[in-house]
């Protein structure tokens, strides 16, 4: 079950409660807008239905609400509440029909849009949910949970940037909503903002320490930030709490590998292999752990097992291929790399390794073909250009070889410049803290000059320029930063 | 949400090679004993912070040299020393040490008497008789100012740095160095690799958080920092040197962050080339073009990167003909998580990376520094000795298997193009963890077995005395140039005995920031005499000697043999 569904199933019941509370608040304010024909009796049956819903007497509630609608078929609130009751009775399609009637009758009825949106989300009609939730949020901009579901739906439909905006707003509207922080953290991680992800996920855990998915996601984000130590602690706690959580155990094994605590990684992954013997990922990671311990026979066995368990896992035959290559079994290695590219035709690294092995076996034409294919999928790979140059050189194509070597040099320099840019950026931040604004500006300019595709550098430069009053130039760099790293919002767009 | 480990970086994946095969059961016929203390080598090398380092400057450690400074036939030892960021009160600074070999297995610390007291961030050392007066001189590199010491011949040295024109205009980070006669004018010139243009005022520090090793904050670099430019000084013959880095093409190398340096004749044309192990960059192989210039051919010749095209964190370099095909092969130590690299010289102008095929890839956990080819049992095949130790003392926080102090690695040549790791079978002191760095190789006790001196960080040195029970013969050759440079650096020696031909060279530099004994050693196996010794002197004269008795140290002077043909 996906974490979102696991969270949301629990939330659905809460939604009902919240909706009832909202409805109760709305009912007390009901006045001139209510339909007049048979209103009073219909409203009474409506109120009765709500009370029965709250008491959990779903069938009774349904009957009361249907009675309300017989008295007044245009009572939108009754359609909405009936939809709620039907939903809880498992009659989802009927529920959806009622919500749709409600929004048709009363396009300004927030609850109906919200319930429609949430139910469509539940039934995985994400585009439908999106429209309904957007309407709900437009009607009640400060409704935290509606924004949360909107953000979640945006995330699930791949609209990460907007998802982050909505989830941030949901969290700001209701700082006690851990699910918003959780999903915000997940979305930021997907956008590459590990720092932001960690902050959001820590906030989620602080609000609800029992939120298992937050712990898991935090562990992953910490790993991506390189903070393996804390990742391990977080995931260890999760596994202790729920020893059956195989995902957490798998991630723990990965974190231990990152920390290079190889013995512990092997122990955890071996336990997982017993718990989930059909987990190809567990077998693969265990293979990697053995490999890093230089226990090569064991590594090979696990990698073969992983490859067999999941015919769609390309990493297993790839890493097996590397092991075989390094044990001097070039022909077998080539077969393994070929298997990897069959499983994933755009696996640039596998094409590259196949080229390497073929080159060593003397098959220059085969190697050339594979290196070129590798470059199609990894156009910025300096090692592939280097390999291409060496192959072309061996074939006597000197000018093409020179061009390939030159490209390899350029890409290596680009990588070196990126690192230098990171240092310049860090230096600039330090200078800013020390009050040296001019020095900081110079450092940020240096960073951008070294790595024009570094969004963080543009962003830092933009902020420094804005402080100096150079608004137009600042705006240009803010926009460039946002283009390069969408999680970096231009300040005016921030909440 | 399960984490999928990124495809393990290829350099992380070990060459498994012989690891998958059982070690042989036969007993080893050689062993090492650490005799440093009883030999009187006790000075501690101070280098940076003990538990944490703020700058990479504190991590590189120091070199070691074997040289016979007093020409008594017994190799002496020179150990470079360092300092700390906090410094020391005047008069208490750690100093380099010169240990004079008494000839009885012990050494005298003659540093002060020799005039070699010097503090600072000492890095590398190389030796050679640059003025051809018959006495071996010393060059010591620094982060700061390098120093050239002229051997007066009376047991003392004079710092002639400024007089020789070697005073630098600013702070540079000199590392590995080598004397060599690149223009074949009979005078030793001087090469020094440079690591990083490090300015402590602006260099990033661990506190910035941008530099991490497996999640822990460590000293930054070298990637991201400005690389140093190597330098070549031409000996003008009057005790003076001229910086010819730009006009010789030395400054135009592809790679930077130079560390280990060795001379070699890569293409066998009689002109000395240079190999530089670069950190996080492709290696540099300067081919001598015979016209006073060099060309960096490392990338084009396949001697620069790993087998799968990645730049490696090269530290030390060893040169030797491990496969006995008459060409000089290259072995390079690299960072933890990577293998060392073995480049077999094909003799056709390029390297064949034999790392995995030769079984070298069994080890990825060690971080290698000093390294040398040596014949452990004089059986006639070159073996390998590697000194290890992690860069970052902060790794003590990690549960890694290797740790900061690490054991040595000894590979035995199996005579079939492959090596076998016999380290564990040797036991202590090979398996004793140390934070090793510079390593020099030389037969300090003249017993026919090449010994090893290691300069350790925050520790005393190791002196590994090699013993072997194998009934094999040997020959050690000291070459004395007459028209060629006196130290004969750049000479090639071919030794034919019992149907086998071995090829060796007299080399400047070597290993990591170190200088090996300039005498050339041959393990002859069962051959009790050498049928023919052929020397190609640095200036081109080729001479032979025949019917040479084995198991001794032989001194050959240029011009005293039978010429082979006209000098090239």
Image (cartoon, coloured by chain):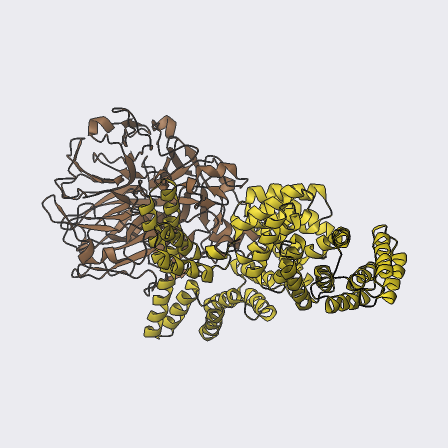
Chain colours: A yellow, B brown
**B525 or A99, nearer to the observer:** A99
Would you say A88 lies left or right of A329 here?
right
Q: Residue at x 43, y 45 (%)?
A: B211
User: Which quadrant, please, contains the C terminus of chain B?
Assistant: bottom left
Would you say A141 lies left or right of A48 here?
left
Q: Residue at x 34, y 62 (%)?
A: B299
Give x and y (percent) for residue B325. Answer: 36, 59
Give x and y (percent) for residue B317. Answer: 35, 49
Above or below — where is B69 with respect to A258?
above
Q: Is residue B382 visible?
A: no
Would you say A435 lies left or right of A270 here?
left
Quadrant of res A6: bottom right
Q: Residue at x 58, y 48 (%)?
A: A200
Quadrant of res A308: bottom right
Give x and y (percent) for residue B99. Answer: 28, 30
Q: Is residue A154 visible?
A: yes
């Amino acid at each position: 079950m996906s974490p979102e569904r696991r969270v949301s199933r629990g939330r659905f019941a809460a939604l009902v409660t919240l909706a009832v509370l909202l409805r109760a608040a709305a009912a007390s304010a009901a006045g001139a807008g209510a339909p007049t024909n048979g209103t009073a009796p219909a409203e009474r049956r409506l109120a009765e239905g709500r009370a029965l819903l709250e008491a959990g007497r779903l069938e009774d509630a349904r009957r009361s609400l249907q009675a309300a609608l017989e008295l007044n078929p245009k009572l939108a609130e009754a359609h909405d509440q009936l939809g709620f009751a039907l939903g809880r009775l498992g009659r989802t399609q009927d529920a959806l029909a009622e919500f749709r009637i409600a929004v048709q009758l009363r396009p300004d009825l927030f609850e109906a849009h919200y319930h429609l949106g949430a139910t469509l989300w539940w039934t995985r009609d994400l585009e439908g949910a999106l429209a309904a939730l957007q309407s709900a949020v437009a009607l009640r901009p400060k409704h935290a949970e509606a924004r949360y579901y909107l953000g979640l739906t945006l995330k699930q439909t791949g609209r990460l940037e907007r998802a982050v905006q909505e989830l941030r707003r949901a969290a700001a509207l209701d700082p006690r909503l851990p699910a918003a922080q959780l999903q915000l953290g997940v979305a930021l991680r997907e956008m590459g903002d590990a720092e932001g992800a960690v902050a959001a996920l820590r906030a989620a855990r602080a609000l609800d320490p029992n939120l298992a998915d937050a712990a898991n996601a935090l562990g992953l984000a910490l790993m991506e930030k390189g903070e393996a130590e804390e990742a391990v602690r977080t995931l260890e706690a999760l596994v202790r709490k729920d020893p059956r959580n195989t995902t957490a155990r798998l991630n723990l094994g990965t974190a231990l590998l990152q920390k290079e605590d190889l013995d512990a990684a092997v122990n955890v992954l071996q336990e997982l292999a017993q718990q989930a013997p059909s987990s190809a990922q567990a077998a693969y990671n265990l293979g990697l752990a053995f490999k890093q311990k230089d226990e090569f026979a064991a590594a090979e066995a696990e990698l073969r097992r992983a490859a067999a368990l999941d015919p769609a896992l390309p990493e297993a035959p790839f890493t097996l291929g590397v092991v075989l290559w390094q044990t001097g079994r070039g022909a077998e290695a080539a077969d393994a790399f070929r298997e990897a590219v069959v499983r994933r035709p755009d696996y640039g690294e596998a094409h590259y390794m196949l080229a390497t092995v073929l080159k060593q076996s003397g098959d220059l034409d085969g190697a050339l073909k594979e290196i070129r294919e590798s470059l199609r999928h990894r156009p910025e790979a300096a090692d592939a250009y280097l390999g291409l140059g060496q192959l072309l050189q061996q074939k006597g194509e000197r000018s093409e070889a020179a061009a390939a070597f030159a490209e390899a040099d350029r890409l290596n320099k680009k990588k070196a410049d990126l690192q230098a840019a990171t240092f310049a950026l860090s230096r600039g931040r330090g200078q800013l803290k020390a009050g040296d604004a001019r020095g900081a500006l110079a450092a940020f300019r240096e960073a951008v000059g070294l790595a024009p595709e570094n969004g963080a550098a543009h962003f830092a430069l933009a902020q420094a320029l804005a402080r100096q009053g150079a608004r137009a130039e600042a705006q240009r760099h803010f926009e460039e930063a946002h283009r390069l790293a969408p999680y970096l919002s231009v300040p005016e767009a921030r909440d | 949400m399960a984490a999928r480990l990124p495809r393990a970086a290829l350099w992380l994946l070990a060459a498994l090679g012989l690891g998958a095969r059982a070690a042989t059961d036969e007993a080893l016929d050689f062993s090492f004993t650490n005799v440093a203390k009883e030999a009187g080598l006790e000075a501690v090398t101070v280098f940076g912070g003990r538990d944490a380092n703020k700058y990479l400057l504190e991590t590189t450690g120091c070199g070691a040299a074997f040289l016979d400074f007093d020409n008594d036939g017994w190799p002496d030892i020179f150990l470079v020393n360092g300092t700390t960021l906090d410094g020391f009160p005047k008069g208490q600074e750690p100093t380099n040490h010169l240990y004079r070999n008494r000839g009885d297995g012990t050494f005298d610390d003659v540093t002060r008497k020799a005039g070699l007291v010097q503090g600072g961030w000492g890095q590398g050392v190389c030796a050679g008789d640059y003025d051809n007066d018959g006495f071996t001189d010393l060059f010591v590199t620094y982060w700061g100012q390098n120093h050239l010491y002229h051997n007066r011949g009376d047991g003392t040295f004079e710092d002639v740095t400024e007089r020789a024109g070697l005073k630098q205009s600013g702070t540079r980070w000199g590392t590995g160095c080598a004397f060599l006669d690149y223009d074949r004018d009979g005078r030793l010139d001087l090469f020094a690799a440079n690591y990083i243009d490090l300015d402590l005022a602006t260099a990033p520090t661990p506190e910035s958080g941008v530099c991490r090793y497996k999640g822990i904050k460590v000293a930054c670099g070298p990637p991201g920092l400005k690389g140093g430019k190597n330098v070549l000084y031409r000996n003008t013959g009057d005790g003076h040197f001229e910086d010819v880095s730009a006009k010789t093409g030395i400054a135009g190398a592809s790679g930077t962050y130079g560390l280990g340096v060795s001379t070699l004749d890569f293409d066998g044309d009689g002109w000395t080339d240079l190999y530089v192990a670069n950190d996080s960059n492709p290696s540099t192989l300067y081919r001598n073009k015979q016209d006073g210039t060099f060309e960096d051919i490392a990338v084009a010749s396949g001697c620069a990167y790993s087998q799968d095209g990645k730049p490696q964190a090269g530290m030390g370099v060893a040169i030797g003909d491990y496969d006995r095909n008459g060409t000089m092969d290259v072995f390079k130590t690299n960072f933890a998580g990577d293998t060392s690299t073995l480049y077999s010289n094909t003799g056709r102008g390029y390297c064949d990376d034999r790392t995995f095929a030769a079984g070298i890839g069994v080890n990825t956990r060690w971080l290698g520094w000093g390294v040398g080819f040596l014949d452990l049992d004089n059986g006639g095949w070159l073996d390998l000795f590697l000194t290890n130790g992690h860069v970052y003392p902060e790794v003590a926080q990690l549960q890694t298997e290797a740790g900061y102090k690490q054991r040595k690695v000894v590979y035995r040549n199996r005579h079939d193009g492959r090596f076998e790791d016999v380290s564990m079978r040797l036991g202590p002191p090979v398996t004793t963890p140390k934070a090793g760095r510079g390593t020099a190789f030389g037969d300090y006790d003249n017993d026919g077995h090449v010994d090893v001196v290691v300069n350790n960080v925050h520790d005393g040195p190791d002196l590994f005395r090699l013993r072997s029970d194998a009934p094999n013969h040997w020959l050690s050759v000291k070459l004395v140039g007459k028209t060629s440079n006196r130290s004969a650096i750049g000479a090639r020696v071919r030794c034919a005995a019992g149907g086998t031909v071995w090829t060796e060279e007299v080399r400047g530099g070597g290993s990591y920031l170190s200088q090996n004994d300039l005498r050339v050693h041959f393990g002859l196996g069962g051959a009790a005499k050498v049928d023919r010794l052929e020397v190609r002197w640095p200036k081109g004269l080729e001479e032979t000697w025949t019917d040479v008795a084995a198991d001794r140290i032989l001194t050959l002077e240029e011009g005293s043999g039978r010429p082979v043909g006209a000098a090239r």
